[in-house]
Image (spheres, rainbow, N blue to C red):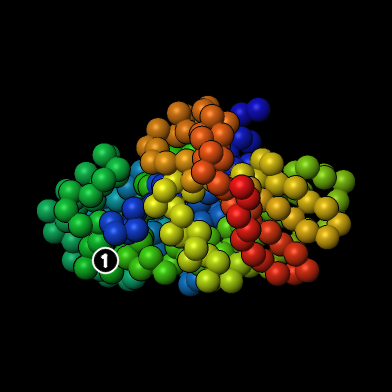
Amino acid sequence: MSKADEIRDIVYINGHVNKKCFITYGIEFKEFYHSLPTPLANILLLKHGFEDSDYHYQTHMDYVEEEQIHLLAEDDVYNYGDFCWIDFEDISSLDLLEPQDIAALLYLGHLKKPLNSPFNNKLGNQFVYLAHDDGFYNKIYFRDVYDMKHILSRIIPLKMSAIKQKRFVFRRKKLEYPILPLVLANTLLTLTNDGLFIDFEHMVQSRKDIKIPLYTIGDFDDMNEMYNDRFEHKEMSKLQAHLVLTHKELEWGIEEVQ
C-alpha cells in the first residue's frame, strides 16, 4: 500500500488552538476545500506543481482565482511534494505587497512557519496551508478557529463515503452521511489539543449503526513516527479510556469505552 492510499484510512490532528494552528495527517486539500463553510476566494501559491495557475509579475508568484480552484482540488496535489499557499481576497491586493511582505511569504513557504504573524492584513487571508506530500503532513493556520469546527463536522462523513467506496467498489451509488452537529465537532476540536486519532481503519458498521474509534495519542510533528507506531499509541490511549464516534438512526454521538 502506498502512502497516498494509507493516509485515507486514518486522520490525526495535533491541535494548537491558542495558536490557531493544526497539524494534520489524512486530510487532503480536496477534502479541506470541500469541507469549508464558505468558498475560498483566491490562492497565492508559495510552493506547488499546478500547471494552470496565473502569474503575478510584481511578486513573481503564481496564483489561482476562485473560478479555477476546483481544478486545483482535483489535481494530483500529493505528488507536488511541497504544497503551500495563502488565500487572499482580491487580485489588486497583490499589488500592495512590499518587499518585506514578499520576503515573509517566501520564508513561510520555505520553512513552513511564519516569520511573524501567519496573517497578512493586506491580503486579508483566512488560512495558511503548508503541506508536504499533501495529506501526509499538513500544517494549517486558521484566522477563525470556527472554520476548523466546520471541517471536522464534514470531513468525517466525507471520509466514510470515500472509504466505503474503496472497500465496496461494486457499489456505484455514492454513499452519503449527514454532517456532524457543531456541538460534537466542538468536542472533537477540544480533543485535538491532546492529539486526536480518528481510526477509520477500524470503523465498524452493522445494519443499525456505525462506530469509529477515537483516541488521544499525544503531540506528534513527525507523521512517520505517528503512523508507524499507531498501534502502540492506541494501546497507550486505551489504558485510560477511549471514545467511539457513533452514528445510530441518522444521529451522531460520542460514547466512552472503558
Q: Residues within 10 Å of mark 1 (few under 14, many from 20)?
A: many
Residue type beneath disc 1: Leu
Residue at 69%, 41% (x, y): give it: 202
Residue drawn at x 60%, y 55% as measured from the top left: 256
Residue 36 visible? no
Q: Is residue 83 left or right of residue 97?
A: right
* Secondary structure state at the residue bearing disc 1: loop
Residue depicted at 26% across the width and 66% down the height: 123
Picture coordinates of residue 142, whole percent (x, y): 35, 61
Relative vertical location of residue 118 with respect to residue 9 in this rendering, above or below: below
Give the residue pinned by disc 1.
123
Determine the residue positioned at 42% across, 69% down. 146
110 and 176: which is toward the camera: 176
**Residue 33 appears at what percent x and percent y?**
51, 59
The front one of 53 and 248 is: 248
- Report x, y in % for residue 47: 36, 43
Relative placement, left or right, of 140 versus 72 is left
Query: Quadrant location of residue 40?
Result: bottom left
Judging depth in this view, the residue of 206 and 99 nearest the camera is 206
**Is residue 207 something one can see in this rendering?**
yes
Instruction: Pick the quarter of the image with the N terminus.
Output: top right
